[in-house]
Amino acid sequence: MGVCLILFVAPNCGSSGLPENKCYLNGSDVPGFFTRRTLRVRVLTTILANAAGFPVGREGPTVVIGSNVAYLISQALAGPYVQEWVDLTGPGAQNALMFDTERFASATRIACGVGGACGMAMIFNAPFGGLLYMFEEITSVSWPLELTFRVFIATLCCAFVSYGLLNLYGSDIKEFVIYAFFHQKRDWEWTDMPAFIAVAALLGVLTSYHTRGMLAFAAARQRMAAKIKKWKSTAKILETVFYCSLCALLSALVSLLADCVEEGTSGLQYVAFNCPEGTYNPIASLLVNTSHSSVKLLFSGNNVGEIHWGSSLLAFATYFSLNVGLTGLPVPGGAFTATMLLGGLFGRAVGALGKELGLLRTASGVYGVVGSAAMLCGFKQMTLAVVLIVVECVNDLALAPVVMLSVAVSMLVNWSINERGHDEEQIERKNLPFLEGEAPEKLDDVQALSLCDPLCPEAVLPPEASVEKIRKALAATQERGAVVDYPIVDDSGSCVGIVTRSKLEAALQVASGEDGLNARRPSRAFEPNPFQAKDDKPIYKVDSLIGMSKKEAVPLDRIMDPTPFMIVEDMPAPRLYALFAKAGERCACVTSRDGRFRGLISRLGLISAARHGLEGASSV
């Protein structure tokens, strides 16, 4: 059911959604991603994927769901404040409803950052962790100053709402989050420091190849899908159902290899599986269980000796294989908790083995915490957020130093093998529009003029243009989906402003009289997706003009941005790069030394040049 919803209703929901969410927060448009349809499908399919037993977590989809909800709320509330009626035809004639896409995008991006932080805070009962997670996800170069306090208040309210709703329904937060509510034996010894470093280094290597394995499986499935285009949907449905069965079968078979163990004194909940009453199956407790429940067992400091190192190691190998093999299937799930579980399994196995051999003195649960942080930071390539979330999960600040140490070691090892984290690699491979914070070395010797987008002569408009000229400009650039800004150039050759495609379309509709006399149609802001909204009628019909004739000009100087950023044609690329990466600009005008218009640099064009170079650049 879930895979059918994804394939035929909302294809954007076939993964965690974090790469696309990150691109939108970075300042790029991701059309069709935050809609009511995708929200409904993502919520339902995330529940189904976790209920089916796939080796996935719910953190990634929950962050995107939070951003999606915030986007829709912002769309409804901010829409009326970012639109304006502009008189294009003189007193008493028809007006055009102009939508300020830049102000709208700024408002929705701030809202999406707040919503994503609330999602992460709710999952782990970690308000500060949610704030830091979104800070590292968005990156400091795209983080508005006012966003910090807003996220702080939002995560605070989210925590109170979660507690209130659970209390209303007679439940408790303990049932849903990884959090230690009672004091546990987690004291660590200095003599265990070399073992902590060794575990972190090993997991730095393992998480690097875990990421590579996931990307390799995704690429292989894409190549296979390209070969069977006719049966692609059917093949994906059958493969997903088969893999779901494989996960259940393999987890059950591996669990049967374990010996039953008598219940200990820790009071923790284990899974009996095939064991008689009063005993439990240690492998089933780690595999045939939710990832949150398994991580709780691994983090505990009160269940020393209740999980044998062999059981942890066998569960690690099984879950590692299943998690890597899942990539590329239309399953909405993240790997946040999955990597926490993998690291916890490996760390717990090392700690239990060392304690059994008499080499280590620290409780094996501490090694589970250290391993979990090391695996997670290598996968996400995050530091502060990982440390804070893990420490908040175990409710023990005394573990902060060893968690920070494991994160530092794992990151150094991971960076020596993988240049980017999993989400960043997906952005690169999917060719999503994401602008890094610093200019790449390949742009060091490039000047501004070389970065200008290809622009046909019809796209350059005068301050007052005829309906026919506007129609030709839109038609000439219709095939170039990336062309969204048009320069307004006066008779002297100077660029006096920039107008967006949406405003040109609105002006042409009014000039063509398609809306009826003084009729006011709903703003695109209230469409399910304002970036892909289409008009009911062709916008190029110019037969029935109202208020002007075909020979009269449309005053584009009334709807243009009269203060675009001007860049001299020989400016070095690294200097102008910061304008887009840190100031969030969408477009800049390139001029000669004497002020004549030479071209436009768009955000998408700069991303393409930064990623592929000037020779291999292509539209993103």
Image (tube, helix red, strand yellow):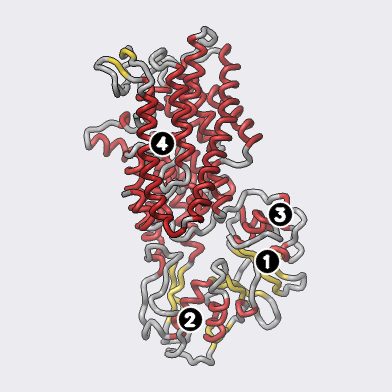
Label 1 vs label 2: CA separation? 27 Å
N-terminal of the pair, mark 2 or mark 3, is: 2
- Regarding residue 45, the answer to whether it shows in the image is yes
Q: Marks 3 and 4, Cα distance to the nearest angstrom?
A: 43 Å
Horizontal side of 149 relative to 578 (left or right) equals left
Which label sits in the foreground, 1 or 4?
A: 4
Dots 1, 2 in contact, CB < 8 A: no
C-alpha separation, residue under disc 2 versus residue under disc 3: 38 Å
Mark before the other along the chain sequence, 4 or 2 = 4
Q: Which residue is mark 1?
A: 452
Q: Nearer the viewer, residue 220 or 576?
A: 220
Task: Report x, y in % for residue 297.
Answer: 38, 23
Residue 529 picture location, percent across and down: 41, 63
| Amino acid type, mark 1 | Cys
Residue wearing tag 3: 574
Are the two marked residues, 3 and 1, in contact with CB atoms closer than 8 angstroms? Answer: no
In terms of image quadrants, where is residue 412?
Answer: top right
Examine the rendering and report whether any part of residue 155 can be seen. Answer: no
Task: Name the one closer to the observer, 420 or 546.
Answer: 420
**Residue annotated with mark 2:** 508
The numbered mark, 1 or 4, whose residue comes first in the sequence reads: 4
Q: Amino acid at mark 2?
A: Leu
Q: Find the distance from the CA under tag 3 to the CA under tag 1.
A: 15 Å
